[in-house]
Each structure stands twice: as structure tokens, then as C-alpha cells.
């Protein structure tokens, strides 16, 4: 990378595929004929592939490539079989590497994570004992497209395992291999893998060996408890030092808290390995000119988690620190916001507008010529349903002009093929018999659009999620059902009508609700990206909970972050701050919201295109543990405030006792508040810094100092802080006596009750949700059972709510650290800015339409609509219903209740639905009605 | 204009792809640079993902 931020010159070296991407049809012939085997890295070397191959069938781009390491032609100028057998003539050995010089304004580094070195895995027998596998290998083993087609088998003898052990913290929290940090994700992914295994094989006996159970993500604790109950997963708190092989099985030994040694034999051991820095982290660091931390991850700071040490270079994902998919996706949007702020002036440069060919309206009006594509979905469908028979059957249905099988309809080459078929055979309706429309319907619609066919003219028959997946044990019935589903889809497809794709203009302003760290960060990002922003804050000052924080986890001053944010917000030309203000009502839809903001009895209407909810959370107020009854019982934030005054806070305090999880994890609130363990450790270290002779005891359930915070936990232990685990049934008690406070608790290692006289008792209380109910009603955004705002999709849309144009960030979404809040707020700002940047938003075509000549103005539809998308309006002297298409979600409630059938739903007309029902009732044919046809 | 409106995203895993999509939606030209022959990274190798047990693809 040369040049400077804003004008970098990135030199990129590109290796050739030796296969022409545009010609390759992914047929696989080259792989079949190549004589040179290659370990299949995609399947974690559990399988063998050949030099010309594709990583997996749905890979994008959908082109094969030749691995130059083993290819005979490339290394020894011999062979040539693949080029000779390729029907598409796509093999091209004349391709050369390319060196590109790209002018870019900013760079985002998202290189992911690396693998734990094999030397660490070998300690547990990996490599010596074939039945010791890594968690990635386990993923491939349980996957239907993996080397064993999803059958969980032992690699030693191919038999199914009966008893499996998961060993956690392999290559993490381990100073002996230089990886002292916690990889954050392994506890939860092990629970997931164990659950998936139990779904495959209900009789499996699975034990998981944890140090601390770090399932603190949103919804994770609840999911783990459900899995433990439903699947009988055994949770054992012990770290396993080694694995031995005994008679073809694996011996796992461990020591329990009461000092006893145990040992059991397992058929398979899964090593839940951690997430390392990428293998080429140092090279990336050097090339990009950025600093790395002691573990070779990118060095960032809590106040700017997505910024590297170099201007114009931003970070996202595991390279910033080990993290899971939702957090990676969140950071990615955040990094996009950072780059967008940085290059706001150059927005639109080199941007490409997609144009679509004109629709052939005449062809659409002709009698239906339906193309039916029955998908194999690899083995997902074809492994259960006889897809060839379904295809043949489709050919017998009325209106069907073409019927074919596809291997993976969603892959690029299949889509090209479908498009070509539609053109060649002048098809004007398409049925795709494959997965759920929720997976890939937009892809098929886009394919139609790209060749001038209205995207509403495709109908999907779900013969996977609702057929092959759920009837996997009854292939004959599943095939029959697939035929029924295809017959119904064809009947409906014949009656599909083209639908308009309108767009609406976007009001170029964002409304951010909440002026804490999240709200200020989001507002600044939107404004720095060039858009106007209104920031509404309920109290009389900005800052929220950040005002109470004294130190960040890296020892820096939180006040500096606060001052910087408040200063920039107040002086930003594009941000209007409204203090002492609340949002009372909102109307409209994405692009065109109008909010009623009230302040001191007066109201003002604010028009905005998008909304960001950043209303924060509250410190839980404890009602237990003598809180309130003594000035020596504090919360962590109160402690921090006292410690800010210096050593004097600890005068006459010989011993500090901290209690974790007060009010959380099943006490008053059921969720884990995620930040309290790190907060406790941070404050404990502060105490030791101010007055090293202070004795500190921390009672915990699980120490959840994940990621690099693990270093703080280790440092605290080294400095003599004593950590004692408690089970929820035997919780520490705070007792107030005349002489002072004491804490009575059960010490698991001693096996007896102990009493600790305490100069200070600090309660690590969690994060309670704010009063989100009111806003949730106003915006019609759902809340989780714990009272936080629910995101649209845990992984694919972690920043958006179910309501288009409304995103959420910070504590309003769930408990998290300051660093995570800032990253998430940047991400929410990116999402909010997208409609503002585009200027127009598309409106979904599946909307209701009222025939006002039939409508009698009864108003039932308006009363029932959950989205306020249909209203009575004046039409001459009468009242008639009218749809607000931009708000309509196509749920159909109005149409199904209309007493005069005056409402039609786009894509789901009454005629089409009735045709489907009649098609179902008509049955498939003679063999379906024969009761003696047994399977 | 003294600066480029193009952005280079290094890494075609789930984070890189999401960043590229958001940047394109925001109106910037993106070069998505990936060392393997396909995008998707480690996530493409995962079987099922929490909480919906969707396949990772």
C-alpha cells in the first residue's frame, strides 16, 4: 500500500484460475479426469479432491479453478487431460498472474482468523488418534455436503460414535502456547455442535468440559439451558490435560472441584479450538502499515474499536479480536460507516447503476408457458425425494412448457441456465421446486428481472424445508408430497400477474433517539457521512451511562471519550440536539417518517427518512445484599466513582468482597449482563493499584472475561485477587452486623462455609432494559423476553429491527461493553445512511389493492391492519379504503377479512389461492388413491 | 476531487462481504480482495448456525 489516506495506491497480486470463469459450467468433468489428488481443504482435509476443482458447489464465483501446487501441466508441462475433456473449452493454461494497481481512498481489513497450531492440538492426541477431531472437522462431518454426507462417524473405523466429549479452551486461555486470550465463541459453538449431533443421533451421550461457561451472547444462556435440558448435554467443569487411547476408544481424565480424579472412555473427542490471528497477520500489518497487539490481532482502542493505527485503514471482524458472526457482521457495517465518513465527499464516484431490460409485456399477457425447475439441492432434496420423477411428473401438468432438474438452482451457473431456458423457450412463468422462498427467492426474482421478465412471475414450491427435511425417513411419501407441491405451484403460477416495483423518495434526515454513547456515535457517523441528523435526548444533558464510567478496560479515561463525543455533537453543523425531549408518536414508513417530539409541554413534528433507536439501558438497582442499608455496599459504578477520588476511598478498607451476577442470570432478570465480569476485574486491578495490600475476593458463577479481557483476569489472579465460584443454589450472603459487614459463602474447594469480614461489598449488578415498551409500541418494533429491542435476524440483520428504516444499537439492543456499543452504533449509522444515500427506497410489490367500486367503507381492514397501512379516505361523498403501499407488508389480514372481497393481494390473489387448493384436492393420479400401495 | 471514492476490502469472509455490500449500497466502488478462489471464508464451511439452524450458506 502506497500513498496516503484518501489516495492510497494498493498493489494487488492476482493468481490465475487457469479456467475461464465465463465459460465454466461447473460440470465437474475436469475434476473427474485429473490424476492428481489434493487434500480437500474445504472439508478440512478429510477428503481428497483434484487439482481442477471448486471449493464447494455453491461457491461464488461459480467457476472451477486449478490448484497450481500439484497440477502436472503447470509443474511439469505434461498431462492435459482436463483441457481435453472440458466440453466448454474453458481450461486455459496460458493465463498469467496479474499485478493490479488500484487507487482507493480507504481500506478495510477483514482477513478473518487463523488456525490454532497443530502442536497445540497434538497435546490432545490429534494426529495420533484418528478419533480426536477439531470442531471444524466436526462441522464438516455433520454437514450433508461433507465428506461423510452428514453421517457422524469415527474416522478410525467408520462406526457411529455413542459417546462424545467436547474439550473447551484448546489453544485459548493458555499461556503455554502464547495464547492467553479467550476466543469468545467456542463455548457457544460447542453447545451448537453438540445439539446438531443430538439431532442426528438422539442416543448420543455428550459431555462438554468447560473452565467457565462463556455463553454470554444475546439469547445464548437460554439456548444453552434449553439444549442441556432437551438433549441431556452433560456440563462438566474441568479442564482436561490430555487424551489417551485405550482399546480403540479415547480416555479422558479430569479433576473435579472437590479434588477427585475421574476418567471416562469416549468414542470421539472434539477439540473446541480457539480463533488465532490470521496466519499472515504480520504481513498484513506490515503491508497496511498498522500496529498489531501482543497476540498479532489488530491493535484498536475501546473508544475507536474499528480504527487501526493508520488513518484511512479500518478493521472489522475476527482480526479486531475473536468474535462470532453477528458481531463480525455488525463490525463490518461499522467499518463501512467509518470509510463512508472518511470519503463522504467522494460518494458516488465510479458507482454503477444497474439497468434492466424492458419487460416483454405482450409475452406476459399470453397464455401461460410455465418452466418448472426441480432442484436436487445437492443431497438435501435428492437424498430423500426422487427429483427425476418429480420432474417427469411436472411435464404432465397443464401449462408446463419446459421441465428440468438442476443440481443447485441457486448457483450462478444454474441461474444462467434458467435465464437462457426462459429466453429460448419464451417462458412467461417459472416454478422453482427447491428450498424455502426465504432463502433464495430474491435471487430468482433478480434473475428474471435481469432478462426482462417481471420478478413476480416466479413461484417457489418448498420441497426441502417442508418436504425432504421433515420427511427424511419416508422417501416415497416425500416424493408424493413433492409432486403435490409442484402441482399446486404450477396451478398458481398460471395465474400470477406482473406487479409494479415502485420507489418512494427519502427525507434526507435521520432521527436518533437517545443521547448516550450509542446515540452520539450514531449521530456523528450519520452527520459525518453528510446527512442531517436530529438527536433526541430525554434528560437535560448528553452522555447517558457513559457519564458514570471512569475508566475503560485499557486503563484510559472514559471521560475523554465522553468529552470528545459531546463536543463534536454540539459543534456539528449537521446535528440538531433536542434535550429534555421525548418521541411521543410516529407515523409513516421508511423514507417518510414523521415523529411528534415533545419538550416541556410543547410538541414539534420532525420529518425523517430513518430512525436509530439508541435509548440505552439502566444499571440494575439491587434489592438484596444489604444494598441501601449500608454505605459500604456499592455497585461497581458507585465503586468506580469512589475510586476516582484516589486512595482515600480505601481508607480503613482491609478487604473488598465482590459478588457477581447480582440480579442477573435468573435472579431478578434472566439474562447475563455481559460486562460485569470484566468490570469487576478492572476495578479489582484499580484497587490493587491504589492500595496493593487490600485483600479482594470475587464470588462468581462463570468469569466471562472473554476476548482480550482474559488478560485482565489473569493479571488480577497474579496480583492475589481470590476468585471463588458459587452455584446459584448456594449464593453468598451479605450480613450486616454492628461491627461491620461480613459475607458468608460456601467455598467449593474447601467444601465448607466461610465468612469474610468486608470493609466494602461490591455488587456486580447488570444492565436492566430501559423503558422500551413505549417506544416499541410507537415504532411497532418487538422486544425480546428480556425487554431489549429484537433485531430482524440474529445473524443477517443484527442492527435492524423488523420495521424497515429503524435500526437499533447500544444497550437498547442488549448489554454490552462501551467498545461493543461504539462499534454497533457505527453499524447502525451505516444501515441508517443507506436509504439516505440512495435517495429513494423500493416498495415491496406484494401489497394490498382495494377495488373501491366494491368497497363498502366498513373500516374492518383499517382496524385490523398491524402496520397502519390501509385507511379510509374520502372518495366523493363516501368513505373508501385505500392502501399506503409503502407501509404495507403484504400480510393479507385486510384481504382475508374484507366482507365484500374488495381487496386483492399482489402475488396472492383469491383466484390463485383457490387454484392451488383445487389442484391439491385433485390429487396426483391413480397411484395416490390406491390404499394398497404400501411403502 | 482529491481523493478516491473507491474502497478496498481485504478478505471475502462474512465481514468482508457485509462491508462490501454496505459500502456499495452507500454509493462507493468496492474492490473485494480475497486470497482463495471463492468468497465465504470459514463461514461457508460451517454446517448449521445458531439460532435458526440455517445452513451457513
Image (cartoon, helix red, strand yellow):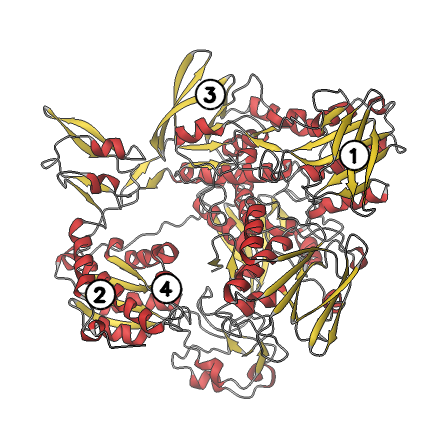
What is the spatial separation of the Cα atoms under label 3 and label 4, in whole angstroms?
A: 48 Å
The answer to whether the residues at label 1 and label 3 have Cβ atoms under 8 Å apart is no
Q: Earlier in the sequence, mark 4 or mark 1?
A: 4
**Residue A490 locus on image (x, y percent):** 21, 63
At mark 4, the secondary structure is helix
Mark 1 chain: A
**Which residue is more in the foreground, A41 or A148?**
A148
Tell me the residue that label 3 is attached to.
Answer: A582
- Mark sitting earlier along the chain (2/1): 2
Q: Earlier in the sequence, mark 1 or mark 3?
A: 3
Which numbered dot is residue A744?
1
Q: Looking at the rendering, in which quadrant would you find the C terminus of chain A? A: bottom left
Q: Are marks 3 and 4 in contact (CB under 8 Å)?
A: no
Packing grade of label 4 (10 A; few <14, some 14-19, many >=20) is many
Give me the C-alpha separation between circle 2 and circle 4.
Answer: 16 Å
Q: Earlier in the sequence, mark 2 or mark 4?
A: 4
Q: Please tell me whether mark 1 sits on a helix, a strand or a loop.
A: strand
Q: Which is nearer the eye, A833 or A545? A: A545
Query: In this orientation, does residue A1 appear?
Result: no
Amino acid at each position: 500500500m502506497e500513498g496516503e489516506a484518501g489516495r492510497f495506491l494498493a498493489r494487488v497480486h492476482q493468481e490465475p484460475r487457469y479456467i475461464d470463469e465465463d465459460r465454466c459450467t461447473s460440470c465437474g468433468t475436469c475434476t473427474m479426469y485429473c490424476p492428481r489428488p489434493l487434500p480437500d481443504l474445504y472439508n478440512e482435509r478429510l477428503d481428497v479432491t483434484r487439482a481442477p476443482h471448486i471449493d464447494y458447489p455453491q461457491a461464488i464465483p461459480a467457476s472451477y479453478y486449478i490448484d497450481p501446487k500439484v497440477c502436472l501441466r503447470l509443474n511439469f508441462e505434461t498431462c492435459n487431460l482436463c483441457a481435453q475433456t472440458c466440453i466448454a473449452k474453458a481450461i486455459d493454461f496460458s493465463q498469467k498472474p496479474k499485478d493490479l494497481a488500484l487507487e482507493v481512498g480507504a481500506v478495510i481489513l477483514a482477513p478473518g482468523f487463523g488456525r490454532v497450531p497443530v502442536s497445540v492440538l497434538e497435546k490432545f492426541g490429534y494426529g495420533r488418534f484418528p478419533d480426536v477431531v477439531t470442531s471444524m472437522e466436526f462441522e464438516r462431518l455433520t454437514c450433508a455436503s461433507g465428506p461423510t454426507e452428514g453421517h457422524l462417524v469415527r474416522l478410525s473405523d467408520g462406526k457411529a460414535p455413542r459417546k462424545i466429549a467436547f474439550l473447551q479452551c484448546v489453544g485459548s486461555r493458555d499461556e503455554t502456547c502464547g495464547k492467553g486470550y479467550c476466543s469468545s465463541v467456542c463455548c457457544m459453538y460447542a453447545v451448537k455442535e453438540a445439539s446438531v449431533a443430538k439431532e442426528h443421533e438422539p442416543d448420543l451421550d455428550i459431555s462438554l468440559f468447560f473452565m467457565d461457561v462463556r455463553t454470554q451472547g444475546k439469547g445464548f444462556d437460554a439456548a444453552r439451558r434449553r439444549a442441556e435440558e432437551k438433549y441431556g448435554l452433560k456440563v462438566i467443569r474441568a479442564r482436561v490435560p490430555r487424551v489417551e487411547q485405550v482399546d480403540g476408544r479415547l480416555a479422558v481424565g479430569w479433576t473435579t472441584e472437590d479434588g477427585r480424579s475421574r476418567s471416562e472412555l469416549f468414542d470421539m473427542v472434539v477439540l473446541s479450538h480457539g480463533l488465532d490471528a490470521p496466519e499472515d497477520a504480520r504481513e498484513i500489518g506490515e503491508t497496511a502499515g498498522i500496529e498489531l497487539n501482543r497476540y498479532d490481532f489488530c491493535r484498536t482502542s475501546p473508544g475507536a474499536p474499528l480504527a487501526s493505527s493508520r488513518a484511512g485503514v479500518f478493521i472489522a471482524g475476527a482480526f479486531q479480536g475473536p468474535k462470532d458472526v453477528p458481531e463480525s457482521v455488525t463490525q463490518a457495517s461499522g467499518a463501512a460507516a467509518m470509510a463512508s465518513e472518511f470519503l463522504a465527499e467522494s460518494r458516488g464516484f465510479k458507482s454503477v447503476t444497474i439497468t434492466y431490460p424492458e419487460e416483454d409485456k405482450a409475452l406476459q399477457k399470453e397464455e401461460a408457458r410455465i418452466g418448472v425447475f426441480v432442484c436436487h439441492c445437492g443431497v438435501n432434496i435428492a437424498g430423500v425425494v426422487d427429483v427425476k420423477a418429480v420432474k417427469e411428473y411436472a411435464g404432465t401438468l397443464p401449462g408446463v412448457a419446459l421441465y428440468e432438474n438442476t443440481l443447485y438452482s441457486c448457483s450462478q451457473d444454474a441461474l444462467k441456465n434458467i435465464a437462457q431456458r426462459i429466453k429460448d423457450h419464451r417462458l412467461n412463468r417459472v416454478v422453482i421446486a427447491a428450498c424455502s422462498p426465504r432463502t433464495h427467492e430474491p435471487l430468482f426474482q433478480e434473475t428474471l428481472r435481469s432478462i426482462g421478465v417481471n420478478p413476480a412471475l416466479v413461484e417457489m414450491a418448498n420441497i426441502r424445508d417442508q418436504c425432504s427435511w421433515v420427511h427424511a425417513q419416508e422417501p416415497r411419501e416425500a416424493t408424493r408430497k413433492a409432486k403435490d407441491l409442484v402441482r399446486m405451484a404450477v396451478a398458481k403460477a398460471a395465474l400470477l400477474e406482473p406487479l409494479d416495483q415502485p420507489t418512494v423518495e427519502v427525507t434526507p434526515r435521520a432521527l436518533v433517539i437517545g443521547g448516550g454513547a450509542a446515540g452520539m456515535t450514531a449521530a456523528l457517523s450519520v452527520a459525518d457521512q453528510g446527512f442531517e441528523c436530529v438527536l433526541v435526548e430525554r434528560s437535560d444533558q448528553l452522555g447517558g451511562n457513559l457519564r458514570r464510567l471512569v475508566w475503560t478496560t485499557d486503563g484510559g479515561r472514559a471521560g475523554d471519550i465522553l468529552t470528545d463525543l459531546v463536543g463534536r455533537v454540539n459543534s456539528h453543523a449537521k446535528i440538531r440536539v433536542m434535550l429534555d425531549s421525548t418521541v411521543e408518536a410516529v407515523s409513516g414508513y421508511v423514507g417518510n417518517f414523521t415523529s411528534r417530539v415533545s419538550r416541556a409541554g410543547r410538541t414539534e413534528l420532525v420529518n425523517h427518512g430513518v430512525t436509530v433507536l439508541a435509548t440505552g439501558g439502566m444499571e440494575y438497582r439491587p434489592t438484596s445484599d444489604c444494598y441501601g442499608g449500608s454505605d459500604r455496599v456499592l455497585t461497581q459504578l458507585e465503586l468506580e466513582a469512589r475510586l476516582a477520588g484516589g486512595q482515600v476511598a480505601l481508607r480503613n478498607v482491609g478487604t473488598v468482597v465482590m459478588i457477581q451476577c447480582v440480579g442477573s442470570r435468573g435472579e431478578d432478570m434472566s439474562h447475563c449482563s455481559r460486562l460485569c465480569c470484566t468490570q469487576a476485574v478492572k476495578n479489582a486491578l484499580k484497587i490493587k493499584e491504589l492500595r496493593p495490600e487490600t485483600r479482594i475476593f470475587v464470588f462468581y458463577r462463570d468469569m466471562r472475561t472473554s476476548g482480550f479481557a482474559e488478560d485482565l483476569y489473569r493479571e488480577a489472579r497474579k496480583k492475589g485477587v481470590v476468585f471463588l465460584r458459587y452455584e446459584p443454589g448456594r449464593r453468598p450472603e451479605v450480613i450486616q452486623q454492628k461491627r461491620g459487614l461480613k459475607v458468608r459463602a460456601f467455598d467449593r474447594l474447601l467444601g465448607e462455609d466461610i465468612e469474610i469480614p468486608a470493609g466494602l461489598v461490591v455488587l456486580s449488578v447488570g444492565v436492566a432494559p430501559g423503558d422500551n415498551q413505549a417506544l416499541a409500541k410507537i415504532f411497532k418494533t418487538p422486544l425480546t423476553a428480556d425487554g431489549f429491542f429484537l433485531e430482524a435476524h440474529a445473524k443477517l440483520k443484527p442492527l435492524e429491527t423488523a420495521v424497515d428504516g429503524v435500526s437499533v444499537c447500544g444497550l437498547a439492543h442488549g448489554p454490552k461493553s462501551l467498545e461493543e456499543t461504539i462499534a454497533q452504533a457505527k453499524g447502525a449509522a451505516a444501515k441508517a445512511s443507506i436509504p439516505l444515500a440512495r435517495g429513494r427506497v423500493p416498495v415491496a410489490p406484494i401489497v394490498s389493492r382495494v377495488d373501491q367500486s366494491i368497497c363498502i367503507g366498513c373500516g374492518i381492514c383499517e382496524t385490523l391492519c398491524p402496520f397502519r397501512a390501509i385507511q379510509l379516505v374520502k372518495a366523493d361523498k363516501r368513505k373508501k379504503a385505500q392502501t399506503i403501499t409503502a407501509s404495507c407488508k403484504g400480510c393479507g389480514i385486510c384481504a382475508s377479512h374484507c366482507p365484500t372481497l374488495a381487496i386483492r393481494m399482489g402475488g396472492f390473489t383469491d383466484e390463485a389461492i383457490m387454484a392451488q387448493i383445487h389442484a391439491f384436492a385433485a390429487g396426483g393420479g391413480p397411484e395416490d388413491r390406491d390404499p394398497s400401495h404400501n411403502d | 476531487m482529491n481523493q478516491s471514492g473507491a474502497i478496498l476490502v481485504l478478505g471475502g469472509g462474512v465481514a468482508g462481504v457485509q462491508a462490501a455490500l454496505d459500502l456499495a449500497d452507500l454509493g462507493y466502488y468496492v474492490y473485494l480482495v480475497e486470497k482463495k478462489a471463492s468468497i465465504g471464508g470459514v463461514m461457508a464451511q460451517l454446517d448449521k448456525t445458531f439460532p435458526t439452524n440455517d445452513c451457513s450458506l
